[in-house]
Image (cartoon, coloured by chain):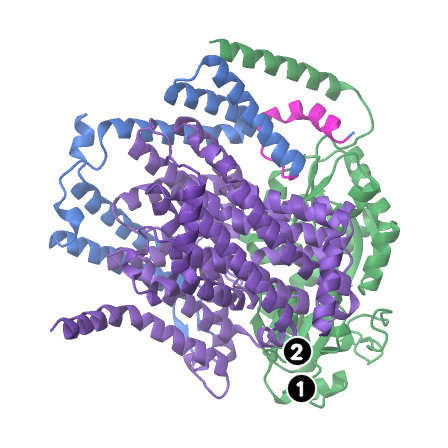
C-alpha cells in the first residue's frame, strides 16, 4: 500500500508543476525535443539534409529543444506519412519531404493519405536536381561524349539503368525520357543513391539518373561523368556539364524538393515558429556553403507560394504516374 | 615504406590527448552498449552521432570507431554470461560461449572471446593497412551476382548449425526468410504481406525485433522455467589459475583464429555483408573443418574464438569500402558514412589523398583501440561477474526493461515491441519442441540482402540463373557459387566419409 | 494442476505442427495478393519468393506431422507434461504482466508503466523489502530516462504523462 501512496504523491506533485508551467501564455516554443521524420533510409539525400538541419540547430542553439531525426523508410514513405497523419495537432513533429510524398499517396491509395489535408507545409529550403551519369570507362558507353551521343546509343541498344527503387523519382524520370527520346532501358533497382553510384562505376549498369551529392565522390575522382543537368542553367559545382535548356531540351527539367511539413491541425502560432526556425537555418552560413558546394539549389519558398508549388508538383507527378502505367 | 610513414603519423594523431581520451571513453561505452541485450554497435553509433558535432571530425570518427570496436568485444560478454547475444554480431558466440558458462568455465569463454577479438582485430587492421588500395578494387567489382553467390555461401555454412530434426531446421530457415520478405518489395514497389493493413508492417520486420524477442524474452522465459525464479544465474569464480587455464585452452584455437581473422576481414570488406554473417560463417566453417566438430555447441573454446575473431576482423574490414568507395560494408558503417557527410567530408576514393589525417588517424586509432579494449575488457570481468551475481528475480525484470526499450528504440514503433513479445512467446514454445531458433534469426538478417542480389541479377540476365555460373563473364560469382555448393554438399558426405574411413581403419 | 498434466509434450507437438501448417497456408494465401508466377518478361513476381518459402514451410510441417504419426520423432512418444504446474504459474504471470506492460506503455507512457511493472514483478517474485522494491522501481525508470532521452536522445513513448516531462526538458536544455 505504501508504495502506491508514495507514487500517487509523486504524480500529484509533478502534475502540479506541469500545469503551472503550461498555463502561462507565451509565444510558442517547443516544450520537448522535436521529432523530425525522414521518409527514407539512413545515408540518402533527405537523411543528409535532415541531419544537417539538426546539426546546425544544435550547434548554434537556434531552438530551445533539440531536433531528433527519425528514419521511417517503410513503404516508400508510406509509413512516415501515416505516422505524421496520425499525429494531427502534434506540435513537436516535423517531416522532411522527398518527392515520394507526392507519389506514394497516389500509388498506395489503401493508405488513405490526403496530401493536401493531412499536412501543414512550412517551407521549401532546397531543390536538388538530377543529372544523367555514365561511367568514364563504361564498356557499353565507350565513345559517348555528349548527351546526343548517348541518346543515339540508347535508341539502338537496351542499356541498363541503375535506380533507387521501383516507382521512385528516377524510374518516373526514365519513363518521362522514354516518351521524349524514344528509347527504352532495363531498370535495375538498388537500395539507395550510394549503391546506385557504385553499381555504375562497377560496370553493372550503363547509366544512372542521380542527384549531385550521391555521385559526387566518383565525379571528383573522375570515375564517372555527367552528360546533362536537368535545369535551365549550369550549376557552379559542375561547371562543364551543360544544362538541358542549352542542349535544346527544355522539357527535360526535374527537381527533387527538400521541404518541411508539420502535421495537420496545428496552431498558426506553431506554424509561424517552425517556419521562422527553418528560415534561420536556411540563412546559416554553414548550411548555405555545404549545400552550394554539393551542387544543390537554394530555393526558399513558404506560405501561398509553397502551397501553389506543391499543388502543381502533385498534379505533375499524378500525370507522370498515369503515363507510366 | 610510404604506408609505414603514414601509419606512424596516424598513430601519432590518435595519441593526441583529446583523441586518446575519446578513444578510451568510446571503448568503454562500446563494451557496455555491446553487452546490453538489444543494443549493438549500430544503435550505439547511430545515437551517439549527434554528440559528435561538438568535436573535430577526426576525433569524432576515432570515438565512434572505438564504440563500434568496443561493442564487438562487449557483445560476447552477454552472450557468455546471460546466453543472450548483446548484438547480432555475437549470435554465434552464444552457441559455445553459453555452454561453457553453464559448465562453470565462463572465465575460459570470456578470455577466449577477448583474445580472439584482439587477434582478429589486430590481424585485420594490419591487412587493412597493407592491402587497402588493391582490396578496394576487388570490392568495387562485387555486384549483384557476386553478392548473391556470397549469400548462398553464407546459407551453405548454416546447414551445419541446425539440430538433428531436419524438417524443423529447414522450417526455421524458411520462416526467417519469409518474415524478411514482409514490407515493400524493392523490385516492383508493391507492398507485401501487410497483415490486416497495419502500417507497422510497411517497414518490414527489423531483425532486432526477432533477435531480441527470441534471445531476450524467449530466453528469459526459458530460464524462468528452468530455475523457477529461485536460483541465481551460473556461479563463476575468477582467479589467476582460471585465467592461466583459459590461456592454456587457447592453444587449441589457432585454426579458429586463422579462419576468423582472414575470413572475417574478407567478408567485412564486401558491401552488404559485415560482422554478423562473418561471425556465423566463421563459426560454421571452423566447425566443419575441425577434427572434433561434434563437440561444437557443447562448449569448446574454438567455438567462441571463431565468431569473436571474425566479427572484430569484419568490423575493421567493413570500414575499407566505407573509406575508399563511400559504400558501407555493414549497417554500422552506413551510419558512420552519414556522419562523415555531416562533418563535411566526401566519402569516396579521394579521401585518402585529401584527408590523410582523418583516414590514417582512424587506422592508427584501430591499433590502439584494440589494445585498450583488450585491457579494459579483461579488467572489467569482475564488474560483469557482479552483474551475474544479482538474483534472477531482479535480473529478469531488468532484462525485460532492456528488451522493451531496445525493441522500441531502433524503429521507435510500439508495433515492433508487440511483435517482439509475440516472437518471444512463440520462440519459447517452439524451442521447447526442439525447433532450432538460430537459423530463423540468421535468415531474417540475410534474407533481404540475398533477395535483392538475386533479383537484380535476374533482371540483368533476363531471368537466367546461368549468370551465377558463368566462368568467363562473372568468374568471381561462379567461383564463390561452386564453393557454396561444395559446402552445401560437404555435411552430407562428411559423416559418410568418416564412417567409411573409420571402418577402413578399424578393419 | 490437471490442465498442465493434460498438455503433454506429445499433444503440444501435434498441436503446434498443425497451427504452423495453418499459418503456412495463410501466408501462401496472403502472398498470392501479388503475382506469384514466373514470366519471361519480368521473371519472378513480388509474391513469388514469399509464396514458395511458405510452401516450403508447409511441406516441413507436413513432414513433422508424418514423423509424428509414424512415431519417428522423440516428441511423438513423450507423455510427460509439456510444462509443470509451478513453472506454468511463473511463465503465465510473466507473459500476462509483459502484455499489460506494453498495453500500458501506449496509454500511460513508458516511465510510469515501468514503475508499476517493476513494483509488481519484484513483489511477486522476490523476497526483497518494500523499501528496496520502491527504490528499485523508481530508480530504474529514472536511469532509463537519463540513458535514452538525455544521453542517446531517443524519445520513448510518454502517452498521457507527456506534459509532466515538459519541466524536465526545460531543465535539461536550459
In primary-sequence order, the first of circles 2 and 1 is: 1
**3D distance between C-alphas at marks 2 and 1:** 8 Å
Residue denoted by label 1 = A141
Q: State the residue position of label 2.
A: A207
What's the magenta region?
Answer: C152-173
What chain does mark 1 sit on?
A
Q: Please say whether residue C33 is visible from this viewpoint.
A: no
Q: In this view of the protein, which residue sits in the foreground, A5 or B383?
A: B383
Q: Which element type, helix, strand or loop, lies under badge 2?
A: strand
Quadrant containing the C terminus of chain A is bottom right
In the image, residue A152 above or below residue B160: below
Q: Say few, some or many: other residues with alpha carbon within 10 Å of mark 1 (under 14 / 14 to 19 / 20 or more).
A: some
Check if residue C168 falls in the magenta segment: yes
Q: Which chain is purple?
A: B
Chain assigned green? A
Give the drawing colour for chain C: blue
In the image, taking residue B176 as reference, residue C21 lies left or right, namely left
Q: Is residue A78 left or right of residue C169?
A: left
Q: Chain of mark 2?
A: A
| Picture coordinates of residue A127, whole percent (x, y) | 78, 60
Residue A146 x, y percent position in the rendering: 77, 85
* Circle 1 SS class: loop
- Tag 2–tag 1 contact (CB < 8 Å): yes
Decide: few, some or many residues near mark 2? Use Cα within 10 Å; few <14, some 14-19, many ≥20: many
**Residue B35, relative to residue B285: is it above or below?**
above
Amino acid at each position: 500500500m505504501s508504495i502506491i501512496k508514495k507514487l500517487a504523491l509523486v504524480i500529484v506533485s509533478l502534475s502540479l508543476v506541469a500545469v503551472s508551467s503550461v498555463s502561462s501564455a507565451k509565444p510558442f516554443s517547443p516544450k520537448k525535443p522535436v521529432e523530425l521524420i525522414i521518409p527514407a533510409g539512413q545515408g540518402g539525400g533527405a537523411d543528409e539534409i535532415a541531419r544537417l538541419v539538426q546539426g546546425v540547430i544544435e550547434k548554434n542553439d537556434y531552438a530551445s529543444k533539440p531536433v531528433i531525426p527519425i528514419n521511417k523508410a517503410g513503404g516508400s514513405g508510406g509509413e512516415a506519412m501515416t505516422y505524421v497523419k496520425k499525429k494531427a495537432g502534434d506540435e513537436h513533429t516535423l517531416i522532411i519531404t522527398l518527392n515520394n510524398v507526392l507519389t506514394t499517396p497516389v500509388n498506395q491509395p489503401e493508405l488513405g493519405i490526403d496530401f493536401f489535408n493531412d499536412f501543414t507545409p512550412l517551407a521549401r529550403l532546397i531543390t536538388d536536381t538530377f543529372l544523367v551519369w555514365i561511367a568514364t570507362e563504361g564498356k557499353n558507353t565507350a565513345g559517348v561524349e555528349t548527351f546526343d551521343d548517348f541518346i543515339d546509343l540508347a535508341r539502338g541498344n537496351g542499356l541498363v539503368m541503375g535506380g533507387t527503387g521501383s516507382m521512385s523519382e528516377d524510374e518516373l524520370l526514365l519513363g518521362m525520357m522514354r516518351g521524349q527520346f524514344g528509347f527504352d532501358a532495363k531498370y535495375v533497382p538498388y537500395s539507395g543513391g550510394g549503391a546506385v553510384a557504385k553499381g555504375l562505376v562497377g560496370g553493372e549498369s550503363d547509366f544512372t539518373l542521380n542527384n549531385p551529392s550521391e555521385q559526387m565522390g566518383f565525379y571528383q575522382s573522375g570515375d564517372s561523368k555527367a552528360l546533362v543537368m536537368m535545369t535551365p542553367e549550369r550549376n557552379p559545382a559542375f561547371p562543364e556539364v551543360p544544362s538541358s535548356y542549352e542542349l535544346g531540351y527544355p522539357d527535360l527539367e526535374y527537381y527533387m524538393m527538400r521541404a518541411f511539413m508539420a502535421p495537420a491541425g496545428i496552431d498558426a502560432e506553431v506554424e509561424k515558429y517552425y517556419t521562422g526556425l527553418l528560415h534561420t537555418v536556411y540563412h546559416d552560413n554553414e548550411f548555405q556553403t555545404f549545400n552550394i558546394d554539393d551542387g544543390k539549389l537554394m530555393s526558399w519558398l513558404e506560405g501561398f507560394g509553397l502551397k501553389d508549388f506543391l499543388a502543381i508538383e502533385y498534379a505533375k507527378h499524378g500525370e507522370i504516374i498515369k503515363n507510366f502505367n | 615504406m610510404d604506408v609505414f610513414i603514414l601509419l606512424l603519423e596516424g598513430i601519432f594523431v590518435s595519441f593526441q590527448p583529446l583523441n586518446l581520451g575519446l578513444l578510451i571513453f568510446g571503448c568503454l561505452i562500446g563494451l557496455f552498449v555491446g553487452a546490453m541485450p538489444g543494443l549493438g554497435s549500430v544503435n550505439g553509433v547511430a545515437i551517439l552521432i549527434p554528440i559528435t558535432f561538438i568535436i573535430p571530425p577526426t576525433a569524432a570518427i576515432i570515438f565512434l570507431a572505438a564504440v563500434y570496436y568496443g561493442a564487438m568485444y562487449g557483445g560476447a560478454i552477454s552472450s557468455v554470461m546471460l546466453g543472450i547475444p548483446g548484438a547480432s554480431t555475437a549470435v554465434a558466440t552464444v552457441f559455445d560461449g553459453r555452454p561453457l558458462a553453464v559448465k562453470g568455465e565462463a572465465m575460459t569463454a570470456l578470455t577466449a572471446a577477448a583474445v580472439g577479438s584482439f587477434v582478429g582485430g589486430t590481424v585485420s587492421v594490419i591487412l587493412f593497412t597493407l592491402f587497402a588500395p588493391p582490396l578496394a578494387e576487388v570490392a568495387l567489382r562485387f555486384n549483384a551476382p557476386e553478392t548473391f553467390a556470397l549469400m548462398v555461401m553464407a546459407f551453405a555454412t548454416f546447414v551445419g548449425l541446425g539440430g538433428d530434426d531436419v524438417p524443423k531446421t529447414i522450417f526455421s530457415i524458411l520462416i526467417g526468410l519469409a518474415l524478411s520478405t514482409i514490407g515493400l518489395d524493392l523490385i516492383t514497389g508493391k507492398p507485401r504481406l501487410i497483415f490486416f493493413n497495419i502500417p507497422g508492417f510497411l517497414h518490414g520486420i527489423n531483425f532486432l525485433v526477432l533477435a531480441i524477442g527470441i534471445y531476450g524474452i524467449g530466453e528469459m522465459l526459458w530460464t524462468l522455467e528452468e530455475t523457477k525464479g529461485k536460483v541465481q544465474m551460473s556461479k563463476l569464480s575468477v582467479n589467476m589459475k582460471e585465467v592461466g587455464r583459459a590461456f592454456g585452452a587457447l592453444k587449441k584455437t589457432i585454426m579458429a583464429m586463422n579462419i576468423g581473422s582472414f575470413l572475417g576481414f574478407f567478408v567485412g570488406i564486401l558491401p552488404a555483408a559485415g560482422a554478423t554473417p562473418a561471425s556465423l560463417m566463421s563459426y560454421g566453417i571452423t566447425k566443419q573443418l575441425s577434427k572434433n566438430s561434434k563437440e561444437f555447441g557443447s562448449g569448446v573454446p574454438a567455438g567462441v574464438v571463431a565468431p569473436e575473431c571474425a566479427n572484430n576482423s569484419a568490423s575493421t574490414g567493413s570500414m575499407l569500402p566505407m573509406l575508399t568507395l563511400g559504400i558501407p560494408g555493414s549497417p554500422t558503417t552506413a551510419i558512420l558514412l552519414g556522419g562523415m557527410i555531416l562533418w563535411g567530408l566526401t566519402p569516396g576514393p579521394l579521401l585518402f589523398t585529401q584527408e590523410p589525417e582523418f583516414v590514417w588517424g582512424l587506422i592508427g586509432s584501430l591499433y590502439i583501440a584494440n589494445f585498450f579494449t583488450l585491457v579494459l575488457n579483461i579488467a572489467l570481468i569482475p564488474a560483469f561477474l557482479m552483474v551475474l551475481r544479482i538474483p534472477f528475480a531482479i535480473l529478469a525484470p531488468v532484462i525485460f526493461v532492456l528488451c522493451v526499450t531496445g525493441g522500441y528504440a531502433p524503429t521507435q514503433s510500439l508495433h515492433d515491441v508487440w511483435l517482439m513479445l509475440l516472437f518471444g512467446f512463440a520462440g519459447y514454445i517452439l524451442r521447447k519442441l526442439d525447433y532450432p531458433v538460430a537459423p530463423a534469426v540468421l535468415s531474417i538478417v540475410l534474407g533481404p540482402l540475398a533477395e535483392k542480389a538475386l533479383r537484380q541479377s535476374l533482371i540483368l540476365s533476363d531471368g537466367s540463373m546461368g549468370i551465377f555460373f558463368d566462368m568467363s563473364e562473372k568468374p568471381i560469382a561462379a567461383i564463390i557459387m561452386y564453393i557454396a555448393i561444395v559446402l552445401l554438399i560437404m555435411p552430407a558426405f562428411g559423416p559418410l566419409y568418416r564412417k567409411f574411413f573409420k571402418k577402413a581403419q578399424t578393419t | 494442476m490437471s490442465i498442465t498434466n493434460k498438455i503433454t509434450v506429445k499433444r503440444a507437438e501435434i498441436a503446434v505442427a498443425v497451427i504452423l501448417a495453418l499459418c503456412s497456408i495463410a501466408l501462401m494465401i496472403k502472398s498470392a495478393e501479388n503475382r506469384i508466377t514466373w514470366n519471361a518478361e519480368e521473371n519472378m513476381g513480388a509474391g513469388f519468393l514469399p509464396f514458395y518459402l511458405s510452401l516450403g514451410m508447409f511441406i516441413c510441417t507436413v513432414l513433422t506431422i508424418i514423423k509424428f504419426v509414424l512415431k519417428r520423432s522423440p516428441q511423438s512418444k513423450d507423455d510427460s507434461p509439456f510444462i509443470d504446474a509451478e513453472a506454468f504459474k511463473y511463465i503465465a504471470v510473466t507473459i500476462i504482466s509483459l502484455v499489460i506492460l506494453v498495453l500500458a506503455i501506449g496509454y500511460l507512457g513508458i516511465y510510469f508503466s515501468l514503475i508499476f511493472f517493476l513494483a509488481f514483478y519484484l513483489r511477486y517474485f522476490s523476497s526483497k523489502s518494500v523499501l528496496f522494491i520502491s527504490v528499485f522501481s523508481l530508480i530504474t525508470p529514472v536511469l532509463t530516462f537519463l540513458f535514452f532521452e538525455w544521453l542517446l536522445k531517443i524519445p520513448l513513448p510518454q502517452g498521457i504523462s507527456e506534459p509532466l516531462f515538459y519541466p524536465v526538458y526545460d531543465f535539461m536544455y536550459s
